Image (cartoon, rainbow, N blue to C red):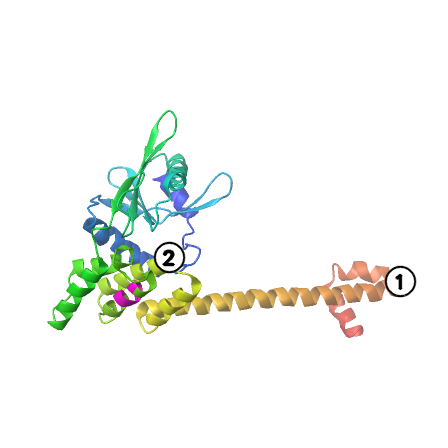
Amino acid sequence: MAHREAILNGHMRNSSPHLNCYAIMKMGLDFFRNTLLKNLGVNYTFVEAAPTEIVSLTIEKMYLDYTFFTTEDLYAHFEFQTTDGKTPDLRRFHSYEATMSHRTGKKVVTYVIYSGGIEATDFELDCGAYTYKVIPIYLNHLDCQNVFSQVDQKVSRNEALSEEDFANLALTPVMAGGATRKDTIKTALQYVKNYQTITAQKTMAILYAFADKFLEAGDLDEIKEAISMTRIGQMILDEGIQKGLSQGISQGIKIGREQEAERMRQLIAQLVARKRFDDIQKIAVDANYLDQLLNEFKL
């Protein structure tokens, strides 16, 4: 257990470079692990979430999408891909696995979940003495418009949405059939926002995680606006306020230090001009005398 605790203590995927709210990620992580993966045919019994940020020996941060430790004594690592990056992607996944396996002493299995439209990819990499493999999962057989249509029918009949319905809505951003990924996420959110259940909130967290991963800043702002009145939206707003306060305090401290340094520079210049070298030594050890001289020179 010590090897896992050591790496978890350095885990900062609090964050993906954009999404830093741990509570939102935790909510989406549970739903992804316990529901979405089973819908995709992945049936491990998971023990705990594993780090999704690895600092390699070159101090290069590696950001993984999702990683879990399983009862099979291995790490299951999942990556979402909207393009087939071929050999460069396979080399990247291989480096993730090699670094994590080296740090933990455990096997790592990588599943690559390809968004709708991708039907076949390279999943083996010739590494000389051995062949590296990932396990691809293709979503080209899933169409988000079909999901929206099925949900529409249930809503029109006032039927409650099932766990599978929410799981399908959560995966619509990586299915085929959508106009744009942003519009697909916004449509899915419109359905989910009408429900106050924990499953709905977890679905919204996954949708926001996809938005954060795939969308540019302007489009991401639209998604934030779409969920602004929800619990997830409030969590994002609270985090933004806290971050703003923290940055403001840090900036204030920086400015204060710069101003204090300038006062000291001016005071020392005044003392040097008057050849009061003993006073320069004294203010270095006597704070009260320093304040006295600052007042004397009106600084």
Residue at x-position 83% and y-position 67%: 270
The residue at the far top in this view is 129
Q: Position of residue 67 (x, y in %)?
A: 32, 46
Question: Where the C terminus falls, by quadrant?
Answer: bottom right
Q: Are there few (<14), some (14-19), or many (20+) residues within 10 Å of tag 1?
A: few
Q: Earlier in the sequence, mark 1 or mark 2?
A: 2
Residue 275 is tagged as: 1
Position of 153 with respect to 97 (left or right) is left
Secondary structure under the numbered disc 1 in the rendered image: loop
The type of residue carrying mark 1 is Lys
Image quadrant in which you'd find residue 203:
bottom left
Magenta segment boundaries in residue numbering: 184-188
The type of residue carrying mark 2 is Phe
Q: Position of residue 13 (x, y in %)?
A: 41, 52
What's the distance in space between the residues labelled 1 and 2, CA to CA? Answer: 64 Å
Q: How many marks can you see?
A: 2
Q: Which residue is disc 2 drawn over?
A: 214
Q: Nearer the viewer, mark 1 or mark 2?
A: 2
Secondary structure under the numbered disc 2 in the rendered image: helix
Q: Are there few (<14), some (14-19), or many (20+) residues within 10 Å of tag 2?
A: some
